[in-house]
Structure formats: structure tokens, C-alpha cells
């Protein structure tokens, strides 16, 4: 695995937005930050360690820490994030499974309002709410479904 294969895989998951932070960290979000989305994974673009960090939940956290090459993610371990020190810490399929699980865990934690915004087709979302674009969610109202 590498950054590009992680990027391709993550962008195929529903409602994923990527952002570049600190000039060298690619973050993957379920929804975008302005609409109440939350980050579920990040990769280091410069090839530094850790190469991938992701949310794994309390149940899986200690299991993953037992694998050589996996540690608690810096600054995020208290929120049950792990970090892969190198790409071969897990097999490619296992990495995809962990990313899918991280995405699902974070999606379940999203507020109802954010989930309802993400459920709308792109064309029906209030102006300014587009995946991958900046928006100001605080002033937006979620349209009610027609009966």
C-alpha cells in the first residue's frame, strides 16, 4: 500500500472529503468540517512515520496495538486512534478493512443534522454544502423531507 492507493480507496467510501493540513498530512473526513463532519484517517505525504493513522474504536484499539509496527497515534490515541509505522504493518486488505471500519465508526458518531445533510443528493443540499468545498454550516437549515 501507499498514499495513492489509500487515497483512491478512501475517496470511494460514501461522503468522504480530503483536506491537506500542515503542508504534508492528508486527512480523510466523513463529511466536511464546516458541516459537522469528522476525520477518520490521515496519511503522511512526506513518507515520515507514522505513514497512516486511523480511528479504530475502543474494542479494536488494544488488539491492533499488539501487532508489530502499530502504535497509539500521536495526539489521538486517547480517542482510540492507531498509527502504522510502515505500510507493511498490515496486509493491504486488512488496511482497507480497518479504513472501512473507521469510516463506519465515525459516521455513526455524526450528529443527526450532519447525517441528514449528507443524505441529501448534492443538488438538493443547501448552497455551500458540497463535498470537498468549504461552507458555513452554522447558518444553514436542513430542508424537511416532503410528505
Image: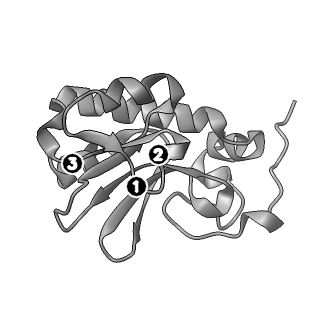
Which residue is identified by label 3? 85
Decide which of tag 3 and tag 1 comes sooner along the chain.
1
Label 1 – label 2 distance at C-alpha: 6 Å
Query: CA separation, marks 3 and 1?
Result: 11 Å
Q: Residue at x 82, y 67 (%)?
A: 139
Residue 114: mark = none
Q: Verify CB contact (< 8 Å) between mark 2 and mark 3.
A: no
Q: Residues within 10 Å of mark 2 (few under 14, many from 20)?
A: some
Give how far across and how far down residue 128 sits, in percent: 65, 67
Horizontal side of residue 36 vs 49, given as left or right:
right
Q: Can you identify the residue that label 2 sits on? A: 77
Q: Pointers 3 and 1 in contact (CB under 8 A)?
A: no
Q: Does residue 51 lie above or below 82 as drawn?
A: below
Residue designated by label 1: 74
Distance in Å between CA atoms under marks 2 and 3: 14 Å
Secondary structure, mark 2, is helix
* Quadrant location of the C terminus in the rendered image: top right
Quarter of the image that includes the N terminus: top left
User: Do the CB atoms of the residues marked 1 and 2 lie less than 8 Å apart?
Assistant: yes
Work out whether residue 93 or residue 119 is closer to the camera in this orientation and state it. 93
Amino acid at each position: 500500500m501507499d498514499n495513492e492507493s489509500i487515497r483512491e480507496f478512501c475517496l470511494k467510501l460514501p461522503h468522504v472529503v480530503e483536506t491537506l493540513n500542515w503542508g504534508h498530512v492528508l486527512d480523510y473526513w466523513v463529511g466536511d468540517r464546516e458541516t459537522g463532519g469528522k476525520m477518520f484517517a490521515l496519511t503522511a505525504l512526506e513518507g515520515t512515520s507514522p505513514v497512516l493513522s486511523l480511528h479504530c474504536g475502543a474494542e479494536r484499539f488494544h488488539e491492533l496495538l499488539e501487532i508489530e509496527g502499530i502504535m497509539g497515534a500521536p495526539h489521538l490515541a486517547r480517542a482510540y486512534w492507531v498509527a502504522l509505522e510502515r505500510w507493511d504493518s498490515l496486509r493491504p486488505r486488512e488496511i482497507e478493512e480497518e479504513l472501512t471500519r473507521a469510516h463506519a465508526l465515525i459516521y455513526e458518531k455524526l450528529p443527526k443534522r450532519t447525517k441528514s445533510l449528507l443524505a441529501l443528493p448534492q443538488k438538493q443540499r443547501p448552497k455551500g454544502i458540497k463535498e470537498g468545498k468549504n461552507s458555513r454550516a452554522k447558518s444553514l437549515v436542513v430542508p424537511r423531507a416532503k410528505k
